[in-house]
Amino acid sequence: MATGRTHRPATRSRGIPEATVARLPLYLRALTALSERSVPTVSSEELAAAAGVNSAKLRKDFSYLGSYGTRGVGYDVEYLVYQISRELGLTQDWPVVIVGIGNLGAALANYGGFASRGFRVAALIDADPAMAGRQVAGIAVQHSDELEKIISDNGVSIGVITTPPGVAQQVCDRLVAAGVTSILNFAPTVLSVPDGVDVRKVDLSIELQILAFHEQRKAGEETAGEDAVAASVPKETPKGPDGDVPVVMPA
Amino acid sequence: MATGRTHRPATRSRGIPEATVARLPLYLRALTALSERSVPTVSSEELAAAAGVNSAKLRKDFSYLGSYGTRGVGYDVEYLVYQISRELGLTQDWPVVIVGIGNLGAALANYGGFASRGFRVAALIDADPAMAGRQVAGIAVQHSDELEKIISDNGVSIGVITTPPGVAQQVCDRLVAAGVTSILNFAPTVLSVPDGVDVRKVDLSIELQILAFHEQRKAGEETAGEDAVAASVPKETPKGPDGDVPVVMPA
DNA sequence: CCCTGTGAAAGTGTTCACAGCT
DNA sequence: AGCTGTGAACACTTTCACAGGG
């Protein structure tokens, strides 16, 4: 996804669509809640509602995993929890390192849904010597000099980057060189990685900007006129850096 | 998106595709960096590389906004920054409230990319009376009793939820009732909202689970055998809650 | 009769490749 | 000659609607 040319002849596998993979954790969460309430079976309709999707999509998604339901009845909750967990690779536990123990790194270290569900915070790493030794979420922060050793000693293959953007790429390079092949990046930077390494990005300000876009549309539709000022900006006659194009965005 | 029936006859507007909207902030960030380095123009190829997409996609995206480039030359950086900012609604500033000032809420309050780019943290709100009055990121935390008043006094239309999952829905309901129409939800819960309210979700554990899925695939391909145990689990002969289906996921 | 599983249709998004402007 | 803007082809995703097992 991130960088990759397709490489292997279609990545083998029963090819579960990416969109489906992205929803499996959602189903798993809903199923886990049902399981805790000792609900034995659930219909596609009910489960879909709990997961916030529609039932046709859910059934299609499950059809990629196999035929795990019973017609006329629904799905066995425990069995489905197991199947999805296995499909997602959560039957094994994944040691994870978090690099950059600022506010956000600390928040993640403390995040409960992290420690459960197959993930274990193997180490917290920070470049600030003053942080080293401090306890965060019951784990001692280690200095980044130790990064390579920590990765290989613990067999870590997943890294989380919560550093300032300026150092994210170099942290990423070190993680990858040490053997990490999956990265969750919270720094607002485009990371470049070699083939075979997956990067997922979480970007707070991008999410807000997308909301702002839709918010603006709503406002424009109601008043339907205020917006017209912007809309009537000459679409042709572009260019004009020689003058007064108002540049927004101070910093 | 979240709940919505389509409502208005195709949402009017020049209908910029959702996928394009999601990339505009990426382009904007890359362009802002170029602008800071006083680069006057940029080609689709260069900008695409900086934003981590391919150039055909970028050109297609920009074509939905209008014809802002010059053939044979490229795009004027300042002009494009302005056009994208306007399109995203960032030429106005958006007051935002953050509800739930734990680790994550504090991280967001301190997040720089938040305060710039048109967003202003209008208030931090927490249900814990002990938090009220404390300063976080230079802003005094207010008690949630004040929520409705804060929303209406500041004309807030965007809310960020960083509460524990158990209270997320009720916080959401109060935000919506008070006039918020866009919500960024960090709590691992499916929020239900009335039509016309947008919800975007950021879920840390889901991202990790998606990474684990791909990570598992990589491991399976290399060893190509270990994985076969799982793969040979009888696809037919499902069901069997009467016995030994190993249930993963302790709590 | 109920609810799953799935082909087929419809809708979105991405990539190609080149016409057309500067 | 170079680079944008865009139709047309392709790929992926969602939705529909119903066949078919329990």
Image (cartoon, coloured by chain):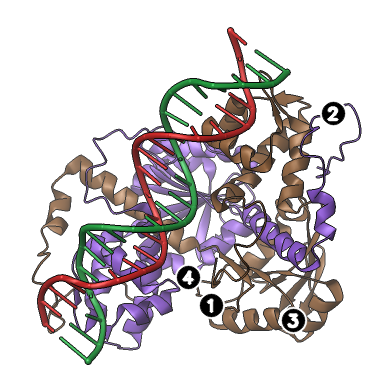
Chain colours: A brown, B purple, C red, D green
Q: Chain of mark 4?
A: B
- Which numbered disc, 2 or 4, marks the residue closer to the eye? 2
| Drawn side of residue B199 relative to residue A93, left or right | left
Q: Amino acid at mark 1?
A: Pro
Tag 4 residue: B112
Q: CA distance from mark 4 to mark 3?
A: 30 Å
Q: Chain of mark 2?
A: B
Q: Residues within 10 Å of mark 3 (few under 14, many from 20)?
A: some
- Which numbered disc, 1 or 2, marks the residue closer to the eye? 2
Q: CA distance from mark 1 to mark 4?
A: 11 Å
Tag 3 residue: A178
Marking on residue B241: 2
First reached walking from the N terminus: tag 2 or tag 4: 4
Q: Residues within 10 Å of mark 1 (few under 14, many from 20)?
A: some
Image x and y of residue A136, in percent: 76, 66
For the question of whether residue A14 can be seen, the reply is yes
- Which numbered disc, 3 or 1, marks the residue closer to the eye? 3
* Mark 2 and mark 3 residues within 8 Å of each other at the beta carbon: no
Q: Depth check: give the residue in front, B73 or A190.
A: B73
Q: Are marks 2 and 3 on the same chain?
A: no
Residue drawn 16% across the image and 75% down it: A245
Location of residue A41 (image quadrant): top right
Q: Depth check: give the residue in front, A240 or B104.
A: A240
| Drawn side of residue A149 relative to residue B177, left or right | right
Q: CA distance from mark 2 to mark 3?
A: 43 Å
- Callout 2: SS: loop
